[in-house]
Amino acid sequence: MDINYKIDNRNLIVELYGELDHHIASEVREEIDMAIDKNSIKNVIFDLKNMNFMDSSGVGVIIGRYRKLSETGGKVIALNLNKHVKRIFDLSGIDKIIGIYNDYEEAISSL
């Protein structure tokens, strides 16, 4: 699993590569939370185009960031879900609480 992020205004764009599972979830969670706190981030946008697997721990990472940002009026959005990750989102119900978009411009306009 690789993680890259960049900041656009108060939006943290997180690009995940590979597999987000119980082996790496806590490390990813800590890295994202550190970036949120350090940079006064309001919204997190997960770009998942290069992620090929996610288990319940990965869902927990996203839901945890949703809870954290909801407390301050922020949002969590996911982009570029492949069919495997989309299925996990659908089964877990996460697609009902965060925005799912096909591209960055569409996501930014929803904020």
Image (spheres, helix red, strand yellow):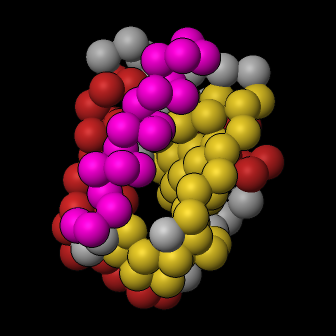
Q: Is residue 37 magenta?
A: yes
- Residue 57 found in image quarter: bottom left
Tell whether 66 sits left or right of 12: left
Q: Is residue 21 above or below residue 72?
A: below
Residue depicted at 51% across the width and 46% down the height: 77
Above or below, 45 against 39 in this view is below
Q: Is residue 59 visible?
A: no
Q: Left or right: where does residue 1 sit relative to residue 29?
A: right
Residue bounds of the magenta highlight = 22-40
Residue 14 visible in image: yes
User: Is residue 99 shown above or below 67?
Assistant: below
Front in this rendered view, residue 97 or 65:
65
Q: Residue at x 23, y 53 (%)?
A: 60
Residue 89 forms part of the magenta stretch: no
Quarter holding residue 92: bottom left
In percent of width and height, residue 34 lies at 46, 27
Q: Is residue 90 above or below residue 78?
A: below
Q: How many numbered markers are drawn? A: 0
The spot of residue 2 in percent (x, y) is 56, 64
Residue at horizontal 31 percent and vertical 26 percent from the top: 68
Expressed as whole percent of the image width and height from the top left, the position of residue 27 reads 36, 50
Q: Residue furthest bottom?
A: 83
Q: Left or right of 87: which side holds 92?
A: left
Left or right, 47 with respect to 70, comes to right
**In this view of the protein, which residue sits in the foreground, 92 or 9?**
9
The residue lying at 35 percent from left, 74 percent from top is: 54
Main SS, magenta region, reads helix
Of the 4 image quadrants, the one containing the C terminus is: top right
Q: Position of residue 25 (x, y in %)?
A: 31, 57
